[in-house]
Every structure is written in C-alpha cells, then in structure tokens.
C-alpha cells in the first residue's frame, strides 16, 4: 500500500519540467533555515525555546561524567569543550588513519569511548550519543563547514555524490531530484529545502525529538520505497560526507529546528 507521502513525491516529480536544475552552485546554496516559517525560525533562534538545547545540556553533563574501565570523562582528555571542541564538528566526517576510512562525529565519540574510556559504544540514535554530539557540535555554532578538504577523503566524497545522484526505490528517485531540482517547492505542505546539513543533530517537530543526519537520510530512503542502509553503514557515512562537503563554507547551526 503506497502512503500519502509516496503519492505526493510521485506527483511532484511527474509535474516537474523535463529540464532539471542540476547541482546547485556554491554561491546559491541556502540553509534549511531560510525555508522555515517565522515560528520555527524563532524557536531555533532562542536557546530558551529551542528544544534541542535540552539535549545540549544533557551532553554537557555527560562530557564531565566518568565512564568505562578507565574511569575517565571526555573532559579529562579534552578539557573545556568551549575551546577544545570549537570548529571540530565543522570538519566531520573526517578521515581516520587507523581505520582507513571516514568516520562521523557519532562514530568518533564511540571510538574515543572504546579507546580511551574502555567503555561500551553508545547505540545509534540513543539519547546519550545525540546529547554528546549536540553538545560538541554546539561549540561550533557559526563556524564555517570545512568537511571534505582532506585529499584522502576524495574517493569517499565521490562515492557519496554518486549515491546522491543515484535513483533508487520503487519511486525511482534520487536525492538530487528533490534537493537540487525542486527546492523552494512544497511536498505535502512542507517546504522542500536544498538538503544542506547545517544543523545536525537537529530537533524535528515531526519527530518530537533530536535526530541525526543518518536518521533523516534513512527516512528519505523509506519515503521513496528503497531499502534503507543500516546506521553506520559506509554508504550513509559517504552520503553524510558528500552533503557536508556540499555545504562547505556554510555556518553550523546545531541544534537546528525543522518541521
């Protein structure tokens, strides 16, 4: 049974001009913030109204909480996050020399837990991993994204770009069909943005909680009736890397608020 979302997507694409827009020039790229209504913008702008800040506060507490067999906290190695973590999230996903591949910020947190705290990894989309990620990324609010600059990341950026352009699912759609070709339109009443990942992890009113970019990507895959990759899959990491490199130069907004 095809849902209203699938029908809406199919209708949108069917009414699109045969001449597609193609990739968005760097100087024309816009944050999802610019597509939001006044109420949603106001919620993001005011930290006392932004529900994502509750996760940031929890992440701040976790930053100083000792964990694992080493009985160490993040702060024991990194000190004051306001200085040590400034600009860090803007570089992720980044290349890990030991693993020989890119890792996301969430994955880096779990690698630090395993290597330095001797602690178990935090599950994807768990409250604690989102809280720590949001707290770390919050320190880079306003910092320009630089992800993808490392030459070692080039093949992974290209992999992500190929996945972004690749049609999939029963609806035979690619990410580019919505976010390059049809931004500024609406889908089932919601604005279609350029898909710039400037605010993750972010609070979605639809979810009523904070969520990662991987969760959003998986939701899009389900929306086009494709098999979603597992959390942490190399394909999702490559897509995240491409999207972050595509947003290079744009300021981070974490935690953003979206419908």
Image (cartoon, rainbow, N blue to C red):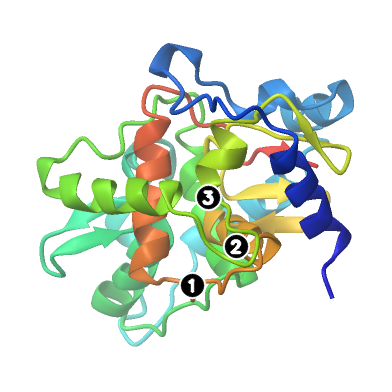
Q: Where is residue 47 in the image (x, y as percent from the top left)?
A: 73, 33
In the depicted structure, whether residue 97 falls above or below residue 51: below
Indicate the secondary structure of the residue bearing disc 2.
helix
Question: Measured along the vertical axis of the image, is residue 259 above or below residue 250?
Answer: below
Location of residue 235 (image quadrant): bottom left
State the mark number for residue 174. 3
Residue on which the image places disc 1: 229
Marks 3 and 1, how far apart in space?
15 Å
List the residue tagged with mark 2.
Answer: 221
- Tell me the residue at 20%/54% (across/down): 95
Q: In which quarter of the image is the C terminus?
A: top right
Is the residue marked by circle 3 packed among few (<14), some (14-19), or many (20+) residues within 10 Å? many
* Viewer-closest of 181 and 15: 15
Which image quarter: residue 26? top left
Please report whichever mark, 1 or 2, sits nearer to the chain's N-terminal start.
2
Sequence-wise first label, 3 or 2: 3
Front residue of 98 and 221: 221
Q: Do the residues labelled 1 and 2 touch (CB within 8 Å)?
A: yes
In the image, 101: left or right of 201?
Answer: left
Label 1 neighbourhood size at 10 Å, few (<14), some (14-19), many (20+)?
some
The residue positioned 34% from the left and 41% from the top of the image is 88
Q: Which of marks 3 and 1 is in front?
A: 3
From where the camera sits, is residue 75 visible?
no
């Amino acid at each position: 049974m095809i849902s209203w979302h699938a029908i809406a997507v199919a209708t949108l694409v069917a009414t699109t001009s045969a001449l597609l827009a193609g990739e968005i020039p760097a100087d024309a790229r816009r944050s999802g913030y610019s597509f939001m209504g006044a109420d949603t913008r106001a919620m993001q702008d005011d930290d006392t109204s932004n529900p994502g800040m509750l996760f940031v506060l929890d992440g701040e507490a976790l930053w100083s909480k000792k964990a694992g067999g080493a009985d160490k906290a993040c702060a024991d190695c990194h000190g004051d996050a306001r200085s040590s973590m400034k600009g860090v999230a803007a570089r992720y996903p980044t290349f890990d020399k030991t693993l020989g591949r890119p890792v996301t910020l969430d994955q880096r947190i779990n690698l630090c837990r395993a290597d330095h705290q001797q602690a178990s990894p935090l599950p994807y989309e768990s409250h604690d991993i989102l809280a720590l990620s949001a707290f770390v990324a919050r320190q880079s609010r306003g910092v320009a994204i630089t992800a993808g600059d490392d030459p070692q990341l080039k093949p992974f950026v290209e992999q992500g770009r190929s996945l972004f352009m690749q049609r999939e699912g029963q609806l035979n759609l690619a990410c580019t069909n919505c976010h390059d070709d049809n931004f500024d339109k609406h889908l089932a009443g919601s604005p279609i943005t350029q898909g710039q990942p400037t605010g993750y992890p972010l609070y979605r009113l639809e979810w009523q909680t904070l969520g990662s970019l991987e969760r959003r990507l998986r939701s899009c895959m389900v929306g086009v009736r494709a098999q979603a990759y597992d959390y942490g899959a190399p394909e999702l990491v490559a897509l995240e890397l491409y999207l972050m490199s595509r947003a290079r130069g744009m300021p981070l907004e974490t935690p953003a608020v979206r419908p």
